[in-house]
Image: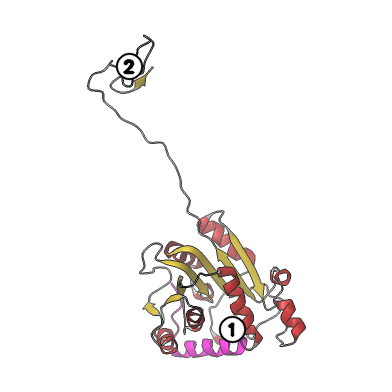
Amino acid sequence: MSRIFDYRDATRFENWLDEALYGHAVELRQNLILKLLDPLPGARILDIGCGTGRDLAFFARHGLDVSGVDPSPFMLDAARVRLGGRAELFRCFGEDLPLEDNSCDMAVLIHTLEFVDNPAAVFAEACRVAKDRVFIGCVNRFALRALGSMKPGGLAEREIPGARFFSVGELKRMVRHVLGDVPVKWRTAFHLPLSTGPRRRILEGSSLVQRSPWGAFVAMVVTPVPRFRLRPLDLRYAAREPGRLATGVNLAGGTGMRVSENRIQR
């Protein structure tokens, strides 16, 4: 079950995001999300654990068809005010989405898995409803630096008790457990102290730096390729006239294919 934020939790979480994401940090995070998702204009995107609608508003500004779900009525109220009717919002848990299979093009889990009891179950639901890709964005357990209070003892213990963080390896193992060997692409952000200096901006935006597993924010996109398992099926056939040729005409007098009541013989 997902954690249900009350008004105090919602306010603290929003304040934490204000503290953690400012200036270049907002641009860096958004660029990384768009780079990995690579959405087409008008694509249907579902934000699971949409919170106050920050990311929904961002996706809507980029021309996407957005909808969001969250178990907290306080979060959803804030999201409705922020979106102004530009998104469909539903109150539900991420483990049990009231949506049909493949009902959206993409699903995103941004700062959602940190606050659920069963991350694999929520991820599996996201894969069920998403036709093309699933995006995961979360705080890195093994970050070399902190983004605001993005660190153990910060957001987790002081602000919202019960939050948990993930490493790149842990997320990949969860994906493999749920889907098997499917395409996975990941990057990280916020490796250096935040600054508007041009050198740091260039370094943080470098693909080489973003391939490091030590950034404070982990971004991962998964393509839930369908898997099929084949099993043999018994073919039961009862001939009306056993002994006659089943196919063709035996013009050469050979051993044509004959049908018995329970098997095909040559």
Residue 241: which numbered mark, if any?
none
Quarter placement of the N terminus: bottom left
Q: Residues within 10 Å of mark 1 (few under 14, many from 20)?
A: some
Give coordinates of residue 49: x percent, y percent.
46, 76
Viewed as shown, does residue 98 lie left or right of 158? left
Frontmost residue, 99 versus 145: 99
Q: Secondary structure at mark 2?
A: loop
Q: Amino acid at mark 2?
A: Val
Q: Is residue 84 magenta?
A: no
> Which picture quadrant has residue 205?
bottom right
Q: Is residue 56 above or below residue 187?
A: below
- Amino acid carrying label 1: it is Leu
Q: Residue at x 40, y 88 (%)?
A: 84
Residue 254: give x, y in percent of width and height. Answer: 39, 10
Quarter location, residue 159: bottom right
Q: Main secondary structure of the magenta part?
A: helix
Q: Is residue 235 left or right of residue 224?
A: left
What residue appears at the point 31 percent right and 17 percent down from the top-left corner? 245
The residues colored magenta run: 1-22
Which residue has dot 2 on it?
249
Q: Earlier in the sequence, mark 1 or mark 2?
A: 1
Residue designated by label 1: 155
Residue 161 point in image, percent of width and height: 54, 82
